[in-house]
Amino acid sequence: MPLTEITAPKVVLTEGQDYYAKLVLTGLEEAFGSAGAVKEKFTGLGFSGVTVWAKRPPPELAFDQPTANGATYYARGVWSKATETLALPAQVTRAWRDDAGPEAAPGAANPALSSSHPADDASRLRTAMADAASPSPNWGFIALLALALLSRES
């Protein structure tokens, strides 16, 4: 699979294009982050078919190593909005574009939304099971708690 690493601080996201990202969460994000929260964030940005791997990269990115400091996540998704340019968030330490594009699953009605990797189904099931066991944290509550603790120390 031909992957092109994205090295610019801003990336042109093309509608229907498959992208990968390596994220490293530190501090409160590391303590309270989850694969489910990463998936929600990417879906909210405009990616569809998002899959998230915690700690280890997917087979397509086996050449990459998790970061020693912080919680490492890998995400893959198809940009489902119109083509636009976005700045990479600080948490994204590496990003790749799949130049081969999404492969159509047999009988798929929309090739841009079909799974392009056989391991995705098992990965989605593992992610769903992990998310069911540990739901996404209430970020508003966590922020208020952190603020209360910080103001208490002053």
Image (cartoon, rainbow, N blue to C red):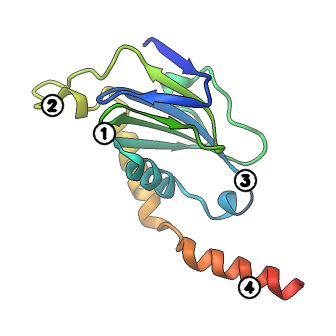
Answer left or right for 9 relative to 46.
right
Q: Residue at x 51, y 29 (%)?
A: 11
Distance from label 1 to label 3 (Cα)?
29 Å
CA separation in Å, label 1 and label 4: 39 Å
Badge 3: how crowded within 10 Å, few (<14), some, or many (20+)? Answer: some
Identified at 68% across, 29% down, the residue is 65
Earlier along the polypeptide chain: callout 4 or callout 3?
A: 3
- Image coords of residue 8 (percent x, y): 61, 25
Pointer 2: what residue?
110
Q: Residue furthest toward the front?
A: 85
Q: Return the residue nearer the eye: 13 or 54.
A: 13
Q: Dot 1 surroundings within 10 Å: few (below 14), some, or many (20 or more)?
A: some
Q: Which residue is mark 3?
A: 26
Which comes sooner in the sequence, label 1 or label 3? Answer: 3
Q: Earlier in the sequence, mark 1 or mark 2?
A: 1
- Which residue, given by chain and number where applicable, does mark 1 sit on? 81
Q: Position of residue 142 (x, y in %)?
A: 62, 75
Residue that carries the numbered disc 4 in the rendered image? 148
Question: Type of residue at label 2?
Answer: Asn
Identify which amino acid the numbered label 4 is placed on: Ala
Q: Are marks 3 and 2 in contact (CB under 8 Å)?
A: no
